[in-house]
Image (cartoon, rainbow, N blue to C red):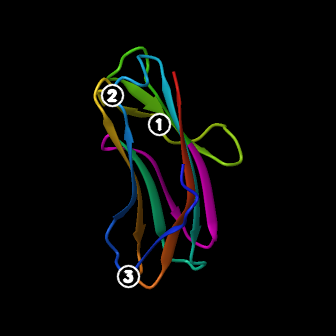
């Protein structure tokens, strides 16, 4: 869990702002990783893209434009197999239906898994900040 702000500005490259490591075997075959992300951003029409990656698979990617904040809860469950995950994006206002397909991955959680929180700017003069994040593992 981190409550210290980490800002990104000055480049249009996707930049890793936080790296989390999930210990090997902590999820089991039916466990869930839940991440809460809170972002702030420059308020203009430029894209400020935020992402959460689980073992190289992107489970959350949203472009913030005229809003000044974004909060998300991302869940990555194993589905009766340490190497099979499924998920969907869930914003701070709850769960519901959507037009995008579910996200799937084949990350072996019997090994340690690297998770990344990244930001990418369309205009290097803008700023995107991860204000806080937390990680829960439900076994």
Q: CA distance from mark 1 to mark 2?
A: 28 Å
Residue 32 numbered mark, or none: none
Q: In this orientation, which residue lies closer to the viewer: 113 or 83?
A: 113
Q: In this orientation, which residue lies closer to the viewer: 63 or 131?
A: 131
Percent coordinates x, y for residue 132 in the rendering: 57, 57
User: Against 134, is 66 above or below?
Assistant: below
Q: Is the residue marked by circle 3 packed among few (<14), some (14-19), or many (20+) residues within 10 Å? A: few
Residues drawn in magenta? 55-73
Per the image, the residue denoted by label 3 is 10
Q: Are marks 1 and 3 in contact (CB under 8 Å)?
A: no
Residue 9 in magenta stretch: no
Q: Is residue 61 left or right of residue 106?
A: right
Q: Are marks 1 and 2 in contact (CB under 8 Å)?
A: no
Looking at the image, which residue is at 32% across and 40% down? 55
Residue 101 numbered mark, or none: 1
Q: Secondary structure at mark 2?
A: loop
Looking at the image, which residue is at 61% across and 60% down? 70
Q: Is the residue marked by circle 2 packed among few (<14), some (14-19), or many (20+) residues within 10 Å? A: few
Q: Secondary structure at mark 1?
A: loop
Looking at the image, which residue is at 63% across and 65% down? 69
User: Given this view, does label 1 or label 2 mark the residue nearer the observer?
Assistant: 2
Sequence-wise first label, 1 or 2: 2
User: Given this view, does label 3 or label 2 mark the residue nearer the observer?
Assistant: 2
Is the stretch drawn in magenta largely helix, strand or loop?
strand
Percent coordinates x, y for residue 104 in the rendering: 39, 32
User: Against 46, is 89 above or below?
Assistant: above
Q: CA distance from mark 3 to mark 2?
A: 36 Å
The furthest residue to the top: 80
Residue 103: name its quadrant. Answer: top left
Q: Secondary structure at mark 3?
A: loop
Sequence-wise first label, 1 or 3: 3
Per the image, the residue denoted by label 2 is 24
């Amino acid at each position: 869990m981190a409550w210290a702000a980490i800002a990104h500005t000055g480049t249009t490259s996707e930049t890793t702002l936080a790296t989390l490591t999930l210990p090997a075997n902590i999820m089991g075959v039916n466990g869930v990783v839940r991440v809460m992300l809170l972002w702030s951003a420059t308020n203009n029409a430029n894209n400020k893209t935020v992402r959460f990656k689980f073992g190289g698979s992107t489970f959350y990617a949203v472009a913030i434009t005229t809003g000044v904040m974004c909060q998300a809860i991302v869940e990555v469950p194993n589905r009766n197999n340490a190497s099979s995950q499924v998920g969907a994006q869930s914003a701070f206002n709850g769960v519901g239906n959507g037009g995008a397909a579910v996200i799937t991955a084949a990350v072996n959680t019997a090994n340690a898994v690297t998770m990344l929180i990244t930001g990418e700017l369309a205009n290097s003069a803008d700023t995107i900040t991860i204000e806080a994040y937390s990680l829960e593992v439900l076994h």
